[in-house]
Image (tube, grey):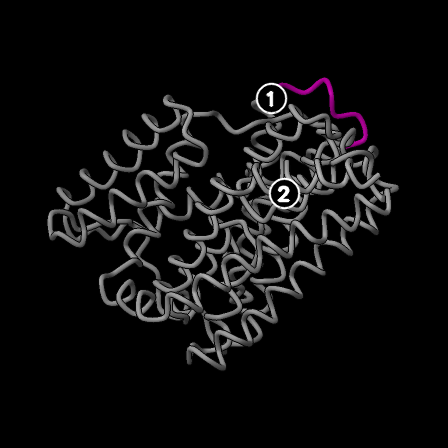
Amino acid sequence: MFASPVRLKPALWWSVLLFISAILAWALTALHLPAGVLLGCMLAGIVLSSRDIRLSVPSPLFVLAQGVLGCLMARSLQPAALLKVAGDWPLFLIATVSIIAASAGLGWLLMRRQVFPGTTAVWGLAPGAASAMVVMAESYGADVRLVAFMQYLRVAVVTAVAALVAHFWTTQSAPLAAEVHWFAVTSQRNLGWTLLLAFAVSSLARWRRIPGGAMVAPLILGAALQAMGWLVIELPPALLAVSYAVIGWSIGLRFTRSILLHALRALPAVLGSIFALMAVGLVIAVGLTYWAGYDPLTSYLASSPGGADSVAIIAATSAVDAGFVMAMQLARFLMVLMLGPRVSKFVATQSRIDR
């Protein structure tokens, strides 16, 4: 079917993508796999992009999807959850910093052993803010294609493993256990304000070129308005499903054939480093469970090394403390945005000096 793909019009390939996505999403959701829509659409995107079918999600649609996810995370950040996090702030801070330190250490080790050319490993293993890391890596002389491959493969692997862990750890996915009313809306007014927050604020953040702002800006503003009682975030399941699909496609469609061929030789080392980073997250999860008293699945998702949007979707479709997971992911995401480029530059510079 895909042997000679190039001559078909993009509209036809979008139809093929929608068809494959629908089948995979239905199958994964029928298996009660958390984030089945996200995973199905991500896999469908990989199937087509790996065959050199070049599709990309329209920018306004991607911005809206990120804004909706920001609102989803904001809805979970209730004052009670934030107060609980504040009470455990030393452990919270240690857990967040540990993931960043572990990624920097792994990157330094791989760079010292020349597993990857130049400073590629340092930028490729930064646990979050994938797009920002790719841009920074290019300005620092790293192999951008390999950095992009490492970043988006990390997101794909972590997302798939987290969804499987959530599926096998719990007997049911909370929102999927009951019949879903896809277009259920309790207040048209609340829906209108939520959509305005999701699209207008995320568009403004993107226009101002704020790294990660399309998701973070609606998240922070939405959480603040919600805490003050000025906004009730309304997100119908159909809107969430479309947003999950867009995020899944945005990940899967990046795995083009040229990137896969370029990274093929480094694939074992890339996967090894990703699983090592996930192992560090698992150790942190054990600490959160033992010392802070969170349930194991909540701790695992909270300490999972990105991406924040994918983990947010899994948390929203699983029986976990979503507020804590969102807060932890947000903190790590913001710290990576602020410290990631500086840490990566420092590690890369030190490695060059040592040589």
Q: Quadrant of the N terminus?
A: top right
Note whether 92 is above or below 64 in the view shown: below
Calculate the distance from the C-alpha at mark 1 to the C-alpha at mark 2.
15 Å
The residue lying at 40 percent from left, 60 percent from top is 316
Q: Is residue 354 visible?
A: yes
In the rendered view, does 319 fall on the left or right side of 46? left
Q: Position of residue 201 (x, y in %)?
A: 29, 32
- Three-letter code, disc 2: Ala
User: Which of these two is toward me, 153 or 336?
Assistant: 336
Placement of the C terminus among the 4 image quadrants:
top right
Q: Earlier in the sequence, mark 1 or mark 2?
A: 1
**Residue 83: where, in percent of width, then height?**
26, 66
Q: Residue at x 50, y 73 (%)?
A: 297
Whether residue 1 can be seen here: no
| Residue toward you, 150 or 186 | 150
Instruction: Give the structural element (helix, strand or loop) at label 1.
Output: helix
The reply, left or right, for residue 123 in relation to residue 226 is right
The x, y position of residue 235, in whole percent, is 28, 49
Which residue in the structure is indicated by mark 1? 10
Majority secondary structure in the magenta region: loop
Residues shaded magenta: 1-10
Seen in the picture, residue 55 relative to 354 is either above or below; the reply is above
Residue bearing mark 2: 44
Dot 2 surroundings within 10 Å: few (below 14), some, or many (20 or more)?
many
For label 2, the SS is helix
Q: Quadrant of residue 20?
A: top right
Give x and y (percent) for residue 313: 45, 54
Residue drawn at 29 percent across, 45 percent down: 220
Mark 1 belongs to which amino acid? Pro
209 w.r.t. 177: above or below: above
Residue 62 part of the magenta-drawn span: no
